[in-house]
Amino acid sequence: MRGQVVVVTGAGAGVGRAAARAFAEAGAGCVALLSRNAERLADTADEVVARGARALPIALDVADPVQVEEAAERIEREAGPIAVWVNNAMATIFAPLSAISPEEFARVTTVTYLGTVHGTMSALKRMRARNAGTIVQVGSALAYRSIPLQSAYCGAKHAIRGFTDSVRCELIHDNSAVRISMVQLPGLNTTQFEWARTSFRHHPQPVGTVYQPEVAARAIVWAATHARRELYVGMPSALTIVANKLAPGLLDRLLAHHAYEQQFTAQPIGPDRPDNLFHPVSSPYRARGSFDARACSRSLQLWASLHRRPVGLALALAGCCALAWAWPARQRH
């Protein structure tokens, strides 16, 4: 990453903010920060600069392809060639489909899915010409296994995976050196639960084991510097994706009976609670949300995945040793 130009969308809070800091720590020369809220971008920029990188904050809405393209032009004009583009911006709504308006559904889809498409288009326009660069799509275990009450978000994450697979095939066909990777995340302690729109009167929460956004940030930086097609983050993500391949019908029923209450705390919220679906929320929110007490700062599964060759070798050696020990024992009997 030394001296490279990196673009991170959704950089004002949550995973995007943590990733921006992680890229600066990894030696990036300039981190371009894209998000709607200029004040939070300024705060993120201060954190990036404090870690030794230049920051270029640009307030925009990724739902608008013109704004995204103009930002890409500005970044290359002021900072240099874009080496890494991270599509992370997202929006969601917690509600059954019957309570979601077409406008709300379209907004979630436009930000989460089409925002990724817009970013990928602008990045590839420049990377293809140089035959160099990496695009990282920030996905979710929900890109494989949907859950109730988040149909718009799950649909968008599924769409990103299908879109990414198609674009990857095109790059391979053209013998392009541009790489595209997708990082599938677990439940995270981010700010989305503080400001996501909901039709329920209790505070939303991540399901299952919760990780700090810095865990996701480490995976994103690693994906940007290694040729891994896809990366699962956290044991819950890996188990969910595998289980859905083996028994999707069983998961349908389990989620139908248990996933409603698991997505909310006992804390009530008022009907006038602001949300960020159509307009950014003015707040001091940073990378982490309100679930520090139950969030994990490490993932053994992720560590093993990032070091799978030595881990595989160690397991193979352990297996050989076990066989070598067992064989004489069997001969004696």
Image (cartoon, grey):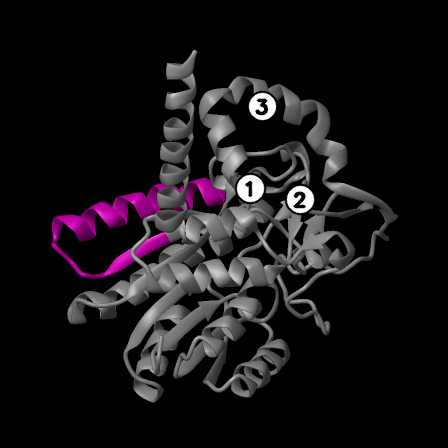
Residue 256 lies, with reference to residue 296, above or below; the image says: above
Would residue 309 be counted in the magenta stretch? Answer: no
| Quadrant of residue 320 within the rendered picture | top left
Q: In what quadrant of the picture does the N terminus appear?
A: bottom left
Tell me which segment is drawn in magenta: 156-181
Residue 105 screen position, x and y as percent: 56, 44
Most frequent secondary structure within the magenta stretch: helix
Amino acid type at image mark 2:
Thr
For the residue pair 46 and 33, the one nearer the viewer reads as 46
Amino acid type at image mark 3:
Leu
- Residue at position x 77%, y 34% in the image: 261
Residue 103 screen position, x and y as percent: 57, 48
Q: In what quadrant of the picture does the C terminus appear?
A: top left
| Quadrant of residue 161 within the rendered picture | top left
Tell me the number on the disc at residue 209: 2
Front tag of 3 and 2: 2
Mark 3 lies on residue? 251
